[in-house]
Image (tube, rainbow, N blue to C red):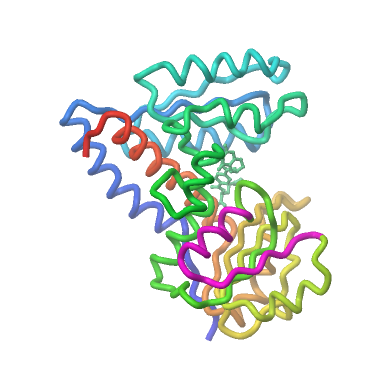
């Protein structure tokens, strides 16, 4: 039969349509959500993601600006920029594009952002709120994955979810969010021996390895829900995920493609968080 493809690009389009209406109602009440994105350096992928965020904001009527800083900026100067944004009442959401240059400690920067403006959901306070199941800003990529699963009414409760990857921005939080949905969660990573032993038991498999096409059909059982978080640029310029799409498509129940899968959802959930931040700071519903 073949897997049903969960198209993140299409789902994003429909969610953005709903957000556009919500933003227009907020505007009638005098509130224009505003997002400030801080970009440090000239990493081509980061530049492209940041302009994607600006374009998506415009599409739904969110006002946005990009603050582009030199790669050589000192950590203390970057923290000063953040401090100013924290104090600016016209800025509802602050996002610092990652990765940062090596001389800057990411965690110092993340922790400098006012948690009420942390639309990336990376601040330890927001991570803690997520872990304790409270309402908060959820990290955008995992939030996008949960939204994709819900859009297809895929049950999570009581299902065995296996995560490959333990990054702070995807692996760790998606495991916690699946746990909050009452899934049984197994984390795997680069030092997990016998990866296949775990992945072949998964009802839901989240793949965030960062290596092209490594998850082939023999890594899954029939009818697994496979979410591919990898974005790998091949030598021929083609973009591909961590999952071998053609092989896994024949065996899985659901599969997300790369491109047009989880990636676009990351930006869309950022817009949701920005609207939430604007409403939270102004108490407008
Ligand atoms: N501060 C943050 N930094 C980073 C995050 C994040 O959530 N917050 N996530 C990633 C990058 N990212 C957003 O920032 C991101 C990655 C991929 C996509 C996307 O739409 N990908 C497309 C393909 C794009 C292409 O052609 O290259 C797709 O998968 O269809 C959007 C956002 C790391 N940094």
In the rendered structure, does residue 140 fall within the stretch colored magenta? no
Using the image as rendered, state which of residue 267 and residue 76 is in the foreground.
76
- What is the quadrant of the C terminus in the image? top left
Residue 165: image quadrant is bottom right
In which quadrant of this rendering is ligand 1 seen?
top right
The correct choice, above or below, for 271 with respect to 111 in the image is below
Q: Residue at x 58, y 30 (%)?
A: 111
- Residue 26, percent from left and from top: 22, 34
Q: Residue at x 68, y 64 (%)?
A: 187
Using the image as rendered, state which of residue 280 and residue 213 is in the foreground.
280
Residue 243: image quadrant is bottom right
Using the image as rendered, state which of residue 261 and residue 146 is in the foreground.
146
- Residue 281, percent from left and from top: 32, 30
Q: How many marks?
A: 0
Q: Give left or right: position of 48 versus 216.
A: left
Q: Residue at x 47, y 51 (%)?
A: 265
Magenta span:
172-190
């Amino acid at each position: 039969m073949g897997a049903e493809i969960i198209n993140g690009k299409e789902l994003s389009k429909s969610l953005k349509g709903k957000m556009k209406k919500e933003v227009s109602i907020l505007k009638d009440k005098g509130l224009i959500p505003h997002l400030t994105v801080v970009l440090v350096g000239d990493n081509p992928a980061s530049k492209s993601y940041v302009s994607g965020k600006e374009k998506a904001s415009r599409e739904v009527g969110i006002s946005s600006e990009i603050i582009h800083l030199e790669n050589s900026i000192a950590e203390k100067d970057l923290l000063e920029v953040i401090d100013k944004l924290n104090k600016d009442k016209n800025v509802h959401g602050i996002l610092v594009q990652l990765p940062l240059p090596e001389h800057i400690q990411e965690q110092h920067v993340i922790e400098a952002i006012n948690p009420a403006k942390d639309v990336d959901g990376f601040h330890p306070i927001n991570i803690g709120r997520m872990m304790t199941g409270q309402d908060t800003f959820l990290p955008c990529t995992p939030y996008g994955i949960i939204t994709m699963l819900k859009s297809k009414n895929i049950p999570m409760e009581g299902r065995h979810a296996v995560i490959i990857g333990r990054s702070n921005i995807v692996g760790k939080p998606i495991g916690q969010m699946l746990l909050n949905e009452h899934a049984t969660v197994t984390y795997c990573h680069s030092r997990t021996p016998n990866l296949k032993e775990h992945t072949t038991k998964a009802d839901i498999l989240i793949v965030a390895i960062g290596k092209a096409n490594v998850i082939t059909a023999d890594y899954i059982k029939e009818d697994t829900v496979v979410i591919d978080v990898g974005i790998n640029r091949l030598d021929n310029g083609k973009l591909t995920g961590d999952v071998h799409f053609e092989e896994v498509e024949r065996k899985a129940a659901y599969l997300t493609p790369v491109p047009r899968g989880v990636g676009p959802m990351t930006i869309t959930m950022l817009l949701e968080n920005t609207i939430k931040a604007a409403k939270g700071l102004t108490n407008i519903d």
